[in-house]
Image (cartoon, grey):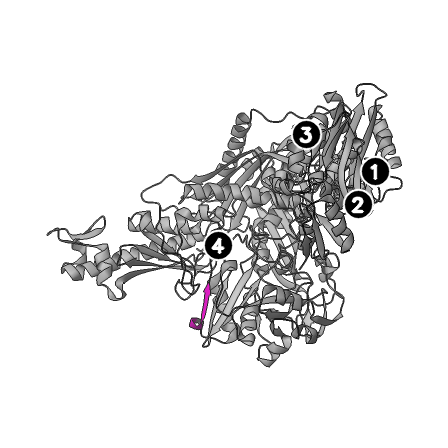
């Protein structure tokens, strides 16, 4: 068990993780989340939001609301202008104002902040604020955003294209001419909501020019930097603290509430806290909807001659993570296969929707839904087993990705074999599987898919290990624990590197005044990048300890041996304990500092930087049962295998993999968020259907694959937060297609779409040969569309 | 802030409901909580009726089963009397919502709050149940139609004759494994289920604002009609019905699956007979 420091009541102090008890505390409701933070004289905020998707903001009438009970202040764009912040912008492309000013760009955009003595008073007063808008024609569909006469969502831009990521490799025209069969398909993904149980929360307070923020952010270092820039502060004048999160799934990966809460606090002169209601979450951040058009050619041996894809994404009204999403999806859409010639164009456009942000899988799920379903369609059309087809085309280590870069460390084949093997094992264990419906209306089949996802490259993580006079070690990083167990990971890495018991590690939670820079806890990078920074900090700490002992004992460092908790002089056997070294140091602690930057290596042949310092790799296999009378799909068994390299915390790795599959069920089967007339069609968790425990396959087997330990080759630790998710939906889609003989191209795989695909017959797979004709085009035309 | 009165007798409850309108009776409170969460305006006054003994009983009478309106769904599902004498109703109660809701929600709330969306309503209609109401002028006979208009007063109990039809089928279609309101629910009861001319009742909920009787569909299913014939029969049953089109499913989908559910419910009933 890892030790615990007394619970800190004052949120001004960094809290310390009690790792062993954390799971029990989460279940029992004892974890102190951001929603539990409070400050003396704290006021509450409620937001006034835009009622229309687009329009000129003429003003905000606060007269009635100002007179309401308990109102402290009402803050709007006029205050931004008065404070010289009218032009201040934040976000992915610095395109987002603190509050809407002059114009509104989506239904739900914050227009004003009501600050009051209580949350209920703030909410009641906010309902009395009148927003005066001259509505204008919105841009609600991405293809409409590209039309020549489309209204421009972001003023000052020539058009609605937010980003365009393109990559080509090889001679596509020549490759097309070699193809004996060509397949062309169109697949779509709707928007979705990250739907962490804990909503976005922010508490901000100003104290003598210093800004202190408690936030549900996944990247406190970047939020602190953005706040400093927005408010013209020295970086050291902003402190961002992050208690444990109740889930995030990418949705808390950029600044969102922090700027407006900080501003409201500054204007009102009070600490201000804002807690999103569930309905607010649906207009705070969403998953990017995407339409993917993909073409593949194969030769007579069933090998790819080429693949190409076009992806059109809807960003919503502000950039947030849209640029990396378009890139990530573009990189992944063609899959980890040997592809001699390839081209991808991934276009992100502004629309008048709530902003799209990071969503677990960062654009790769949208891409894999298309790429991996088409792989299956090709195999079935050619009469090749889909697993065999993949095995024949998947990359091996040292081979080139479609971009032309060499992949040194490829394990997709192992992942695929492990997933299939585990599914077979699950079938053998599942002796009490329900019999197929007697009237023959239940059809069962298997599907597989693989996933590849980059990790942010380059990115920086820093760590500080502080040996204290009590002999314990504080592990200071800005990695955010959102339930994924990163605190356990960094503690274990530190303990192993220092050769000290885990019980001696104390994890300090993110507090930018105390914990060092970390780019972000996302992209499945913390185990890898923060882990490496912790290892570097451990090495530095050991060096500093040796230096201090050397001075203390008066012997050169190279005469010192480590003997458990002590350094000893190899000759005299005189020694000194670690705690004593720290006690004698200034401040009563000795610090080791480590930094890790995953600079992209350059391809040995081309000299070009690689797209990702390593690839998250996984495969999923599922058995589904489809009720052909009602169209309801049930995942009966699921298996997944992800490449971990080195597992740090086996229970955590297993839970991450299982969580991947369970999380992936939602967008596959249930979740959808649409914006008819610009407003979300769902604003609560009764209608927004997340998977429940009753939807989890009874047989769910996962494996984190590791490299055999070798003395001279360091094996990288891979994060496991997203390795399987992108494969879940296409694996289910492939299984459903095998079961019913019709392919569904639009997520989610709803009962209505299943029935429509059944009606369409085998048009999805049997056609599609030759020059992209037949069933492929029929499918692209929407033969499985309609309904939800 | 809403007011709450806690009468100690049925008479007091009726007085409270009449004295300070618009008061609403409250027992489990599940429907009101949901409405509050959805931002709807709630009544200003509630009259707590959940503890009144007249509303809490499950009684096996000589030829009838009487169930108080404040019996919880969990109690219904677990009751040996209900499981023996009206297993369809017990099954419907056991399948509703989730364990937490079933513990709190009551039969009366379930029937009155969303009559068109209540699985228990479909089950009780298929069982031929009727209701008794406590009105300002006295308690009615146990003969008030369940799917009729709701007047003043308090739903007291529902009553069905026993033994009920020996064979029953219950088909509750939902997309998720748990926690969903159904897309459609069909309840069927059959007398002499194995006979080609079996007589029965079929009711559907969650497909329209009110419960829908599917007598033509049932007859076609009993007669093992062709797919086309049973679909045509459903069209007849739905000819005056505005089928719900919502986030769970389109009206077209609901129309399509109703014949499937009825056919399956009949098959269930025949297996049980």
- In the image, residue A243 lies in the stretch drawn in magenta: yes
Relative placement, left or right, of A525 versus A291 is: left
Q: Are marks 1 and 2 in contact (CB under 8 Å)?
A: no
The residue identified by callout 2 is B244
Q: Please state which of residues A457 and B141 is positioned toward the viewer in this rendering.
A: B141
Q: Chain of mark 4?
A: A
| For discs 4 and 2, the disc positioned in front in the rendered view | 2
Kindly indicate whether the residue at mark 2 contacts the one at mark 4 (C-beta within 8 angstroms). no
Magenta part of the chain: A236-244
Q: Is residue B140 visible?
A: yes
**Labels 3 and 4 touching (C-beta < 8 A):** no
Query: Above or below — where is A578 with respect to A264?
Result: above
Residue B215 rendering spot, x and y as whole percentages? 85, 31
- Residue A105 vs A575, above or below: the answer is below
Q: Which residue is mark 4?
A: A610
The answer to whether dots 3 and 1 both sit on one chain is no
Q: Chain of mark 2?
A: B
Q: Which residue is mark 1?
A: B145
Q: Secondary structure at mark 4?
A: loop
Mark 3 or 1: in front is 1
Which label sits on residue A443?
A: 3
The CA distance from mark 1 to mark 2 is: 23 Å
């Amino acid at each position: 068990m890892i030790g615990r420091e007394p619970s800190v009541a004052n949120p001004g102090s960094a809290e310390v993780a009690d790792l062993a008890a954390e799971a029990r505390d989460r279940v029992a409701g004892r974890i102190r989340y951001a929603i539990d933070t409070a400050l003396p004289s704290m006021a509450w905020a409620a937001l006034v939001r835009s009622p229309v998707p687009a329009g000129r903001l003429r003003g905000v009438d606060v007269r009635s609301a100002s007179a309401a009970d308990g109102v402290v202040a009402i803050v709007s764009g006029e205050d931004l202008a008065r404070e010289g912040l009218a032009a201040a912008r934040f976000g992915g492309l610095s395109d987002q104002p603190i509050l809407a000013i002059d114009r509104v760009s989506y239904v739900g955009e914050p227009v004003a902040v009501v600050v009051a003595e209580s949350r209920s008073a703030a909410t009641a007063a906010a309902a009395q604020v009148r927003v005066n808008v001259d509505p204008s024609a919105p841009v609600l569909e991405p293809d409409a955003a590209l039309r020549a006469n489309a209204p421009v969502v972001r003023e000052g831009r020539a058009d609605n294209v937010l980003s365009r990521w393109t990559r080509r490799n090889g001679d596509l025209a020549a490759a097309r001419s070699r193809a004996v069969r060509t397949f062309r398909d169109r697949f779509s993904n709707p928007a979705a909501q990250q739907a962490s149980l804990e909503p976005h929360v922010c508490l901000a307070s100003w104290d003598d020019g210093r800004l202190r923020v408690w936030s549900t952010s996944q990247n406190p270092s970047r939020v602190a930097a953005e706040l400093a820039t927005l408010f013209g502060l020295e970086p050291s004048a902003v402190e961002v603290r992050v208690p444990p999160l109740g889930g995030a799934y990418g949705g808390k990966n950029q600044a969102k509430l922090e700027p407006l809460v900080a501003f409201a606090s500054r204007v009102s002169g009070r600490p201000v806290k804002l807690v999103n209601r569930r309905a607010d979450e649906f207009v705070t951040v969403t998953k990017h909807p995407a339409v993917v058009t993909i073409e593949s050619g194969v030769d007579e041996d069933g090998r790819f001659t080429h693949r190409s894809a076009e992806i059109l994404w809807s960003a919503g009204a502000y950039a947030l993570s849209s640029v990396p999403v378009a890139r990530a999806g573009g990189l992944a859409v063609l899959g980890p296969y040997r592809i001699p010639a390839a081209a991808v164009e991934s276009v992100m456009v502004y629309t008048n929707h709530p902003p799209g942000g990071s969503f677990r899988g960062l654009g790769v799920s949208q891409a894999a839904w298309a790429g991996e379903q088409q792989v299956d369609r090709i195999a079935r059309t050619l009469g090749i087993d889909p697993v065999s087809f993949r095995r024949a085309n998947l990359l091996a280590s040292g081979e080139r990705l479609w971009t032309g870069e060499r992949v040194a460390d490829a394990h997709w084949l192992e992942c695929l074999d492990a997933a299939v093997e585990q599914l077979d094992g699950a079938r053998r264990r599942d002796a009490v599987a329900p019999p197929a419906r007697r009237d023959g209306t239940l059809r069962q089949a298997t599907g597989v898919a693989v996933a590849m996802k980059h990790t942010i490259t380059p990115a920086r993580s820093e760590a500080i290990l502080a040996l204290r006079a009590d002999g314990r070690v504080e592990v200071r990083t800005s990695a955010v624990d959102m339930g994924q167990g990163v605190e356990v990971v960094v503690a274990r890495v530190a303990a192993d590197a220092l050769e000290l018991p885990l019980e001696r590690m104390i994890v300090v939670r993110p507090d930018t005044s105390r914990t060092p820079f970390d780019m972000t806890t996302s992209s499945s990078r913390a185990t890898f990048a923060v882990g490496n920074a912790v290892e570097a900090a451990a090495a530095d700490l050991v060096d500093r300890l040796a230096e201090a002992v050397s001075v203390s004992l008066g012997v050169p460092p190279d005469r010192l041996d480590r003997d458990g908790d002590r350094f000893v002089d190899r000759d005299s056997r005189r020694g000194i304990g670690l705690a004593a070294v720290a006690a004698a140091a200034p401040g009563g602690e000795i610090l080791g500092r480590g930094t890790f930057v995953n600079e992209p290596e350059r391809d040995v042949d081309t000299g070009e930087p690689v797209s990702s310092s390593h690839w998250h790799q996984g495969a999923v296999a599922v058995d589904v049962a489809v009720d052909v009378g009602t169209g309801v799909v049930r995942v009966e068994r699921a298996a997944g295998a992800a490449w971990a390299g080195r597992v740090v915390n086996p229970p955590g790795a297993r839970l991450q993999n299982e969580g991947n599959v369970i999380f992936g069920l939602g967008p596959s089967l249930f979740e959808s968020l649409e914006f008819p007339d610009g407003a979300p069609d769902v604003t609560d968790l009764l209608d927004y259907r997340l998977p429940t425990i009753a939807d989890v396959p009874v047989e769910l087997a996962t494996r984190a694959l590791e490299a055999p330990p070798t003395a001279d080759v360091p094996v990288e630790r891979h994060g496991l937060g997203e390795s399987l998710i992108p494969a879940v939906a296409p694996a289910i889609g492939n299984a459903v297609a095998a079961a019913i003989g019709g392919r569904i191209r639009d997520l989610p795989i709803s009962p209505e779409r299943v029935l429509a695909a059944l009606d369409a017959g085998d048009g999805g797979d049997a056609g599609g040969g030759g020059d992209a004709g037949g069933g492929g085009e029929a499918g692209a035309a929407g033969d499985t569309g309609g309904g939800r | 802030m809403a007011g709450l009165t806690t009468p100690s007798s049925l008479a007091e409850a009726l007085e409270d409901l009449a004295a300070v309108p618009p008061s609403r009776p409250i027992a489990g409170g599940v429907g009101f909580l949901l409405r509050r969460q959805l931002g709807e305006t709630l009544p200003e006054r509630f009259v707590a009726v959940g503890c009144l003994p007249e509303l809490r009983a499950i009684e096996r009478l000589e030829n009838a089963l009487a169930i108080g309106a404040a019996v919880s769904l969990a109690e219904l599902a677990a009751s040996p009397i209900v499981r023996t004498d009206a297993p369809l109703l017990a099954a419907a109660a056991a399948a509703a919502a989730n364990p937490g809701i079933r513990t709190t929600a009551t039969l009366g709330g379930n029937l009155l709050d969303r009559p068109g969306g209540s699985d228990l309503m479909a089950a009780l209609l298929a069982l031929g149940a009727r209701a008794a109401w406590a009105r300002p002028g006295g308690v009615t006979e146990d003969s008030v139609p369940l799917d009729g208009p709701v007047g003043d007063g308090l739903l007291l109990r529902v009553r069905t004759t026993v033994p009920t039809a020996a064979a029953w089928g219950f088909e509750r279609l939902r997309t998720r494994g748990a926690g969903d309101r159904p897309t459609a629910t069909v309840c069927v009861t059959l007398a002499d289920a194995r006979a080609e001319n079996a007589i029965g009742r079929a009711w559907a909920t969650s497909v329209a604002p009110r419960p829908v009787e599917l007598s033509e569909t049932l007859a076609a299913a009993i007669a093992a009609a062709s797919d086309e014939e049973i679909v045509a029969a459903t069209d007849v049953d739905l000819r005056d019905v505005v089928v719900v089109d919502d986030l769970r499913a389109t009206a077209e989908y609901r129309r399509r699956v109703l014949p499937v559910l009825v056919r399956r419910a009949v098959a269930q009933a025949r297996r049980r007979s």
